[in-house]
Every structure is written in structure tokens, then in C-alpha cells.
Image: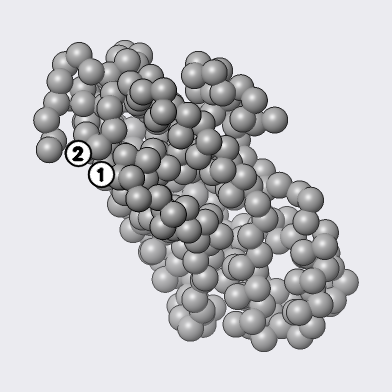
Amino acid sequence: MYSTTLHDADLERNVIERMGASWDTRVAVRQERLDLTQYYDPAIPDFPATMVPFWDDPEFAALDQPLKLRFLAAAWVAYNEKAIYLEDEIVQPLCSLLLKNRLPGVADPRVKQVLAQVQVDEQFHILMCLDVCNSARERHGLFGYEMPEPLVGTQLKRKLAAISDEREAAILRLAFASVAEMSINAYLNLVASDMSIQPLNRINTDMHRRDESAHSMAFRQIVASCFKALDAQGQEQFRRHIRAALDDFTTPDHGSWASILAFLDIPGREALLARLDTATRAKRLSRDYTVLSSLFAEIGLEDALT
């Protein structure tokens, strides 16, 4: 099941070898844990106001400051719980399948080492996110708040339910994990670089961002190797599924905003969400396509981002 071969992966071996060798000194899990009891200023927001799409809506702007700060704390919880979801439901299952050789091109022991390292990193990211979520919930009385399942997750489950072939289901997971791991940095950079929020939140996100930057490069090599080892049918399935994954990842998802507004019993929230839906209907969420573009150029998928 977990067999390896020295001549399987069609990839830049130096890249994979360097990543595997540098893991001990590079990743968050090998660094000293952040002390979440450090200085916390209750007047500083937990999450960037600029990332709330209706922050300047007149009705929302009229809310009192303590309620808006509590809203931003709940947004910080939702932000991190979405990160947990992506790690646990999209990236980890794909890594497990690749370790078991359910797709070709990844049986090289150096690839297996990096995949196992990614799994350790992702589990630690889940712990990091759980810690900061619990801290925010305790400080702001948010233990009753529940974030709904992200739209990208429900879309992946719907697509998996429509596929009976195990290999195609693995290819579908490969496509969704590829987008998750190779375009997440824009999502993390917005928080990690925002100097207006709690310093601990910014530092925590930056630690996550640095790991994901390395994962992005690793996945770029691994996915390219896997794609080249697929037959023509498998390659066409990957092309089709990654286009769908790109669409699902960039479709605005208002579920978390709606859940926070409802939990905090914000007045006029139905009209607020209706205005948000109208304003974002033709828009796409921001992603960092630098690494994906490089992958697509190599495997002949340049038009996927147009």
C-alpha cells in the first residue's frame, strides 16, 4: 500500500530534496509555540475590517463599536475555522490517497517524505487555529457561535457523490487540493500583513503563511508529476475538475457572514445580506495564481485561468 520506487516521480528532485531536508528548521511545528496569554488590547480588532465586504454599509457602520469589535472577533473565528476545514477536509484526504499510491507519479520516497511532512504541518495548523479560535471565543463570549460548512466543501461533496469511479474521485480531490494549496497565500497575506489587528493574530497567520508558501511549491512539483503519469482520460478529468475547483474557490460565499450576523442578532441583517449579494454577484474572490500559472504552463492548461 505504501510502497515506494526510486524512479517514479517526474519532478524537480532538487526542489523536493531541499524541502524535505529543510523541514526541521523551516516549519511552524518545529518552532516555539506562541503564548496566547501575551498582551491583548480589547480596543484592537481581531480581524481586518477591510475584509468585511459590508463594513462601510451605512446600517452596519452605525452599529456601536463594542458590537463591531465582537463581530470582528467572530469573523476571526470563522476565518480560522475555514482554514481548519480546508486542511482537514480537502488537503489531508488527498495527501493520504497519494501516500497510498492511489494516483501515479508520486511513489518516490522523497515525495512520500514531503507528503508526510505536509500532513504534520497541516495537523499543527489545525492546532494553531483551534488555539486562537478558543482564545477569541473566551475573550468575546463566542462559544455558542457555529460556522456553517464552506461552500467549496459542499460543492466538493456534491461532485464526489456524482462519481462512482475511485480513480476519478481521487483526481477530483487532487484538483481541489491543488487549488487550496497553490493559491491560498492571497487569503493569508491579507491578514498576516494587516497592522491594524491584534499582533498575536497577525503573527499566528504569518507562521501559517510561511508554511503554506513551501507547500505551494511542493504541490506544484507533485501535481505536475502525477498529471504527467496519468493516461489521456485521467489528464482530461483533471483539466475538467480543476476548472470547476477554480470556479468554486473564487465564488463569493456569504454563509459565514450570515451566520455571524444571525448569532449576534444584528438588526436589518436580511436587507444587508441582500445588498451584499447584489454587489458581489458578478465578482470573484482574490487568489494568488502565481504557482498555479506555472503549473498550468507546464501541463498545457494556460486557458484555465482566463
Q: Residue at x 44, y 54 (%)?
A: 162
Q: Which residue is mark 1?
A: 96
Residue lying furthest right in this view? 58
Classify mark 2: helix, strand or loop. loop
Number of on-image labels: 2
Dot 1 lies on which element?
Answer: helix
Question: Is residue 87 visible in this depiction of the protein?
Answer: no
The answer to whether 41 is drawn above or below residue 220 in the figure is below
| Residue that numbered label 2 is attached to | 100
Which residue is found at the position 52% from the left and 56% from the top? 155
The residue type indicated by label 2 comes to: Lys
Q: Is residue 205 visible?
A: yes
Q: Position of residue 232 (x, y in %)?
A: 41, 23
In the rendered structure, are the residues bearing label 1 and label 2 in contact, judged by CB atoms less than 8 Å apart?
Answer: yes
Q: Position of residue 241 (x, y in %)?
A: 50, 39
Quadrant of the rendering where the N terminus is positioned: top left
Q: Where residue 256 sits in the image (x, y, percent)?
A: 59, 68
In which quadrant of the rendered image does the C terminus lie? top right
Residue 29, relative to residue 235: is it above or below? below
Callout 1 amino acid: Ser
